[in-house]
Amino acid sequence: MTQFAHRKGTVDVTVRRADGTAVGTPVSLRQVSHDFGFGNIGFELMDVATGRAAQSDLSDAWLSLFNQATLGFYWRNYEPTEGAPHTADLLAAARWFRERGVRLKGHPLAWHTLAPAWLMGRPLDDVERTLRDRITREVTGFAGLVDQWDAINEAVIMPRFTAERNAITPLAHELGRVEMVRLAFETARAANPAATLVLNDFLLTEEYAHLIEECLTAGIQIDAIGLQTHMHQGFRGEDQLAAILDRFGAFGLPLQFTEVTLVSGNLMPPEIVDLNDYQVEQWPSISRGEQRQADEATRMYRQALEHPLVESVTWWGLCDRDMWLGAPGGLLRADGSPKPAYDALHALIKGEWWLPATEVFPTATGVVTVSGWAGDYELTAEGKAAMVHVAAGASGRLEVTLT
C-alpha cells in the first residue's frame, strides 16, 4: 500500500461551461489547501491581525506554512476586568485569519491556570455560573469563525492543582473531574451544536485514558482527544509516540497533537518536573540543536500523518523571541530567519505532501481526474475557475461549472 494512501483521494470531475457544454481545452489544476490541520498558535500575529501592525515577514512565514491557528482565550488575559472581555481584538484576529483561508481553534474554555483573579473568593455556585456564562459567551459570539475549541484543558490535575491559587480548582474538586468535563462540553455544545469540542491534556498516561473512558461511559460526547507534546527535555521518539497513539487511539476518536515543542538549543534537564520551574536568563538556539530539531520535527510529522486517527499537529510558536519559557522552540530564530526545521516542514507540507500545479487535458466528455491529498483544488480553464474538494479515501465522480 502506498504510504499516506489514507490521506488521499481521487475524483473524476466533469468540467462544464456556464451554458452546460463540456470543456475541451486544457485545465489548470492547483491545490489550494490541505484537510489535515498543520497548525500553529496565532498569538504572535495578533498585532498584525488586529491592524495594529503591518503584515510582516513573520506573518508571511506563518501563512506560507500553516492552515490552522489556535487563538488564545486565556480567561485572565481575555477578561482582566469582569464584564470587559477583549472580544473586539479576538474577533478582528479571527476574521483576519479566516479571510486568509486559515481554520481556527479557541484555547481554552475551562482551565484552572490563568483563571481571573476577580473570581477568587466567590461561592462555588457563583463560580460555576460565571464559568458557564463565559463558555456560552465565547462559543456563541465566535460561532462561524471559531468552531473548534479546547473545551477543557488539563482536567486530569484540575482538582488537585496546587501551584497557584485559583477559583476553578475548588470547583473541580467539588464536582469531580467527569462532571467538570461535562460542564465544559455540554455548555459549549448547547451554545454551538456544530462546534468540534476537544478534551486536551499534557498527562498522556493511563490516568488521562481512564478519565476519557469515564467521560464516554457517562455519556459525554468528546469530538477529539488533544495530546499536548511539549518536548523541552527531548524528543519522545517513535516508540513512545506509537505507544501514546495506541493508548488514545483505542477510543476510535480523532487525535490532535495540540502543543508541539522541540527545542533547537540545549535540552531542559530531565530532573525538572514542572516545566514552568525551569527559569534561565538565556536559552539560545545552537547549530547542532537546529539540525536535531529539524530531524525530530520531520520524524514526528511523518509519524503523525501515517496514523489514520491523527487529524492535526499544532506547533506551539513560530519565532524564538516569543516562545513559552523563552525556549528556542520556534521554527524561526529570534531575528526572524528560518531554521532548518522550518525549511524541512515546508519541504514536506508544501512539497512532498502537496500536489504541484499542473495542466491536464479533459476527455472528450470534459472529464479530468483530480487525484491527490485530501483538500481543496482549483480548476481553471478559458479564464474561469471552479473549486473541487477531494476527501480522504474518495473515489467518485462529480460535475462543476466554471464561473
Image: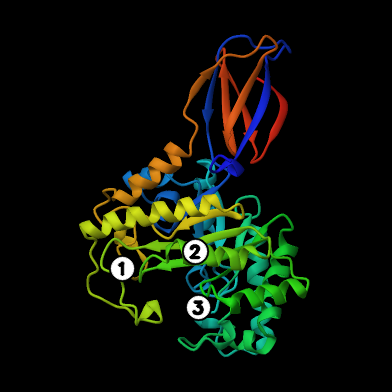
Can you see residue 397? yes
The residue at which mark 2 appears reads as 241
In space, the residues marked 1 and 2 are separated at their CA atoms by 25 Å
For the image, the number of numbered tags is 3
In which image quadrant can residue 84 be found?
Answer: bottom right
Q: Give the vertical position of 392 relative to 233 (above or below).
A: above
Image position, residue 347 (x, y; %): 38, 41
The residue tagged with tag 1: helix, strand or loop?
Answer: helix
Disc 3 residue type (three-letter): Thr
What residue is shown at x 50% (from left), y 59% (from top)? 71
In space, the residues marked 1 and 3 are separated at their CA atoms by 19 Å
Residue nearer the viewer, 85 or 94: 94
- Quadrant for the N terminus in the image: top right
**Disc nearest the viewer among 1 and 3:** 1
Q: Which mark is residue 326?
A: 1
The residue at which mark 3 appears reads as 113
